[in-house]
Image (cartoon, rainbow, N blue to C red):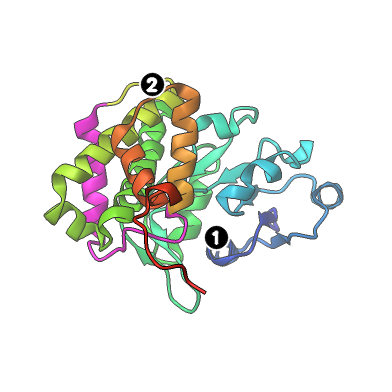
Amino acid sequence: MAKKPVVVIGLGEMGSVFARGILRLGHTVIPALRDTSLKKLAREVTKPAAVIVAVAENDLADTLGKIPKPWRKRLVLLQNELLPDDYRPFDDVTVISVWFEKKKGQDSKVIIPSPVHGPRAKLIARALATLDIPARIVAKDRDMLFELVAKNLYILTSNIAGLRVGGNVGELWRDHEAFARSVANEVIALQEGLTGSRFNNDDLIAAMRAAFDGDPAHQCMGRSAPDRLARALAHADRLQLELPTLRAIAAEQAGPRVDELPPGPLLA
């Protein structure tokens, strides 16, 4: 008996990894690209085994707004900075906190096993296993919330701290632990505000450190770091959170105002 197809929305580096794993399980993969009409495709593929949304995080909200009704209970989400409010309108969503990298021309690089939660967790874990990418199934909503926040903590702490100190995550913790903890504690406060939940800071920081140890040479600051900081402070403003360390880093990145610059010769 033929297996149900799987729709993959977005076939970038990450989407291609999931598509390859799904193919190895014997499913047909139906790609949905930028110019694909999801509504039309849903009329042709009414009951896929899963709909993997592999678009970039900045495109997630727009994509979710276009998900056809037959697919709404079949979603798999894998974006960074993902929290339950992002998918609350949907039922039976499967989420995975991705802890492997995939860059163009390189094989996937595993940092730690990726936690996955939801009705299609077994399918995703089996698909990744065909590629030697470990995943672990998380049963409880609360436990998966912790995993999502831990991933956000890792990304935001390393990216935002990296704006000041550069380097890699191993160096960040070895040489700047007090500063990294200050950033991390403010990121946790932000995550608590965004989720309406409380967390044990030590447990979250321990989870972040485990990821640091999984790939200590991982560079702190990617191209998205300034945008992540700006987005974090926009959330903080809305939630009326102070976050003085993050605001100090933002001020450093902005540099002095023109009226604060010392006098000097004009450039032609």
Query: Residue sitting at 37 percent across and 44 percent down?
Result: 251
Which residue has dot 1 on it? 18
**Residue flagged by tag 1: what amino acid is it?**
Phe
In the image, the segment drawn in magenta is: 200-225
In the rendered structure, which disc, 1 or 2, sits on the residue that comes first in sequence? 1
In the drawing, what numbered circle is on residue 197? 2
| Residue 139 visible somewhere in the drawing | no
Residue 95 location in percent, x, y?
51, 41
Residue 178: numbered disc: none
- Res 60 quadrant in image: top right
Q: Is residue 154 above or below residue 34?
A: above
Q: Nearer the viewer, residue 44 or 82?
A: 82
Residue 61 x, y percent position in the rendering: 65, 41
Taking the image as shown, residue 146 lies to the left or right of residue 58, namely left
Q: Is residue 203 above or below residue 13?
A: above
Within 10 angstroms of label 1, few (less than 14), some, or many (20 or more) residues?
many
Kindly identify the amino acid type of the residue bearing the numbered disc 2.
Ser
